[in-house]
Image: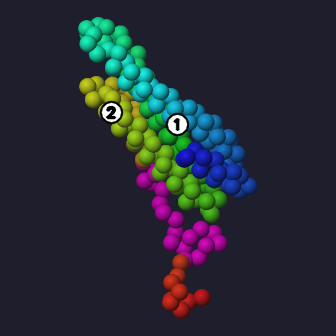
Amino acid sequence: MAAGLVEKVARISMPQMIGAAAIRKRAASVRMVATAYIESDARAYSDYMAALRAARGRNAAERERIVGPAFGGILSEPLKVARAAAEVADMGAELASHGKPSVRSDAMVAVLLAAAAAQASAATLAANLVKSPADAKLGEVRRLATAASERARRLRAPDPGGGRGRGRARSASSGRP
């Protein structure tokens, strides 16, 4: 969803922002790849659960032979999702800063969604690596999630006056036109 918003904002911003066309193209690519990652993550989890069931009652060596490859799958997918999310957050932040002002809020939402996806990936990987907190994958996914969240934090809400062509909201009883 975040990459789709980035695509939309980039398309609308193309007449005024150099580089918006490239961002739009990259966002479309990341959106397609991220969708595949999410589907692959679901398959990896199903495969892992099936491996756990198949390994019940086996000796340690057999359990490792059965579960090991499936465990590797549940470790690699959240990292891929976090990488894509961090890239989308970067693109969204660029558009929020330099894109068309009337769609700045959409760019900001894309950054927030991407940051949330990166944080969710970090939480998933941390849960999967509870016995290996020093794993390099966990360090990388945490760095990506932190960077995406920092991008979101640095974006400020739009001026209360609204974007170009938008005035401040007034109540009907304010007596102002």
Q: Name the spot of residue 70 as percent of width and height, x first.
A: 40, 19
Name the residue type under label 2: Ala
The residue depicted at 50 percent of the width and 90 percent of the height is 173
Residue sitting farthest toward the bottom = 175
Where on the picture, by quarter, is residue 23? Answer: top right
Q: Position of residue 111 (x, y in %)?
A: 51, 50
Residue 130 lies in magenta, yes or no?
no
Q: Is residue 123 visible?
A: yes
Stretch in magenta:
150-168
Residues at marks 1 and 2 touching, judged by CB atoms closer than 8 Å: no
**Dividing the image into 4 quarters, which one contains the C terminus?**
bottom right
**Is residue 167 within the magenta segment?**
yes
Q: Amino acid at mark 1?
A: Ala
Q: In this figure, which residue is indicated by the disc labeled 2?
A: 126
Drawn side of residue 129 relative to residue 73, left or right: left
| Badge 1 or badge 2: first in the primary sequence | 1
Local secondary structure at mark 1: helix
Q: Is residue 69 left or right of residue 88?
A: left
Tell me what residue is drawn at x 61 percent, y 73 percent: 166
- Residue 143 in view in this figure: no
Dot 1, crowdedness within 10 Å: few (<14), some or many (≥20)? Answer: many
Task: Identify the secondary structure beneath mark 2.
Answer: helix
Characterize the local packing of mark 2: few (<14), some (14-19) or many (20 or more) Cα atoms within 10 angstroms: many
| Relative height, residue 92 to residue 144 (above, below) | below
Query: Extreme right residue here?
Result: 15
Percent position (x, y) of residue 174?
50, 89
Give me the residue at 61% from left, 55% from top. 98
Disc 1/disc 2 C-alpha distance (Å): 18 Å
Q: What numbered label is drawn on residue 84?
A: 1
